[in-house]
Amino acid sequence: MSDPTTTTAPVAPRRGFHLPSAYTILFALIVLMALATWIVPAGSYDVDKNGSPVPGTYHSVESQPAKIVVDSLTAPINGLYGVENAKGNINYYNSGTLFGAIDVALFIIVIGGFLGVTMQTGAIQAGIGRLVSRLQGRERWMIPILMIVFALGGSTYGMAEESLAFYTLVIAVMIAAGYDALTGAAVVLLGCGIGTFGSTINPFATGIASGFAGVSISDGLVLRLVMLVVALALGIFFVLRYADRVKADPSRSAVAAMHEENARHFSVEAGDGGDAVMTGRQKAILLVFAAAFLVMMYGVIPWEDMNIGLPTLWWWFPEMTALFILFSIVIGIIGRMSETDLTDSFVNGARDLLGVALIIGIARGITVVMNNGEITDTVLNWAEQALGDVGEAGFAVVMFVLFLPLSFLIPSSSGLATVAMPIMSPLADFAGVPAELVVTAFQSASGIMNLFIPTSAVVMGGLAIARVPYGTYLRWVWPLLAMLVVLSVLALVAGALLG
């Protein structure tokens, strides 16, 4: 979510070939799936009492080819309302409850409103500014501390576009401390990105993927937390090592040729945040902001199933949505916002994430067309045959590898989760792999790709603000990306073997 009150440097248009937007790619996939229903044989699995397909029971059924134009146009709408196959039955594997994507989309919109209200109070901006101010003169410590703060934002609520508000401030301080623009950009970009890579309760990645996989957001939490801690340690070491090298010898900076120009450009902003004052009200708002996510996590964790003596609330998307509406109002009251300011900031924040909600509907439409055409189970059967002998660890790694190119084509984590999880999670049942491991494979692959792909507005926008050429950034960051890939593979193998 981006801060509507923040002005960032415009991103110069790039010449040459451009990938179409996620909306166009997803709608094109709907049309392709509609065409596929005329080619791919129809088939079906027998299902158990939970609606999960039973391995080895695949059989052919009568073909149900789609009406290319009509079904392609109505698929996103039907995806939001609920998925019905040609027989009129809900066909949604591993869901626990039978629903479409409307509850997920509404949850995302309300989260946008919640973030909009919080950002309008200035509490998050003041908190970062105060931290920068307190660390003046101890800038080396600012690198790990700020990366941890940004990573917490990425891990808990998918901090992405709103991080663009902090690039100028952080880069200015880093240059003044003897570092360079790439160091400042890396602190923000890698901090948020690694947090998203190791998402713990991020509703846009883990939450949506878990919902479509039919597991709780708390399932697989320990493994994701370990991945977050290790990845963040690697990222901090990587940035600190580079920053120390640049400070000792500025000529070793990856953007050494632009040092004088960047120093002049960002020196105007160097005083921003130097006198940052954080009020008691803003501190209280940050505490309430954090409490909202803690309460959400408590509400969705099945304490009874874990044999922990705490009452289980059995919350899901309706309860979580209501929770963030409540906390939006509480934050507005603490911030002494008028009724008009509260509702306007909520609506503006919700508007920022409306595109995400639309992506969910369009993406879910792909599954609608496949289910209506009775080809979903055929695809599952092909995958079952192809992956039948790879073993649990091999399955987890293959899932991770498959999600890498998909994340390039669909950089939206929510859109990718909506497209892929209804298909991938039943495969986990066939391989005897917990569905939450597929969620972890998805989010780690998506997190790595969104650290560098040119289809990410956050990557390109952040680098444009930092005045760091994209090619320079790629040459600099690739060793860290390789380390994160290795970490993901090792974690998924361990998760499969220990699961």
Image (cartoon, grey):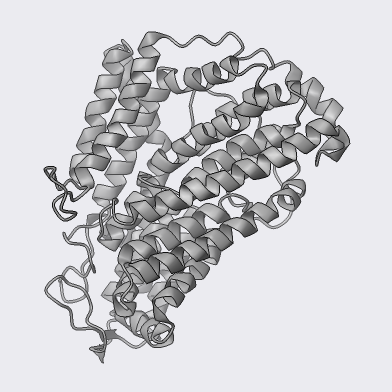
Q: How many marks?
A: 0
Identify the image quadrant of residue 285. Answer: top left
Residue 257: percent from the left, percent from the top? Answer: 88, 36
Identify the image quadrant of residue 7. Answer: top right
Check the picture and name the quadrant holding the N terminus. top left
Q: Residue at x 77, y 25 (%)?
A: 178
Front-lying residue, 71 or 206: 206
Q: Along the horizontal axis of the image, is 298 left or right of 151?
A: left
Q: Residue at x 20, y 57 (%)?
A: 99
Q: Residue at x 15, y 53 (%)?
A: 307
Q: Is residue 71 visible?
A: no
Q: Is residue 223 visible?
A: yes
Q: Residue at x 33, y 42 (%)?
A: 108
Residue 458: percent from the left, percent from the top? Answer: 57, 42
Considering only vertical position in the picture, is 35 above or below 460? below
Q: Along the horizontal axis of the image, is 220 left or right of 178?
A: left
Residue 485: percent from the left, percent from the top? Answer: 57, 61
Identify the image quadrant of residue 320. Answer: top left
Residue 301: percent from the left, percent from the top? Answer: 22, 48
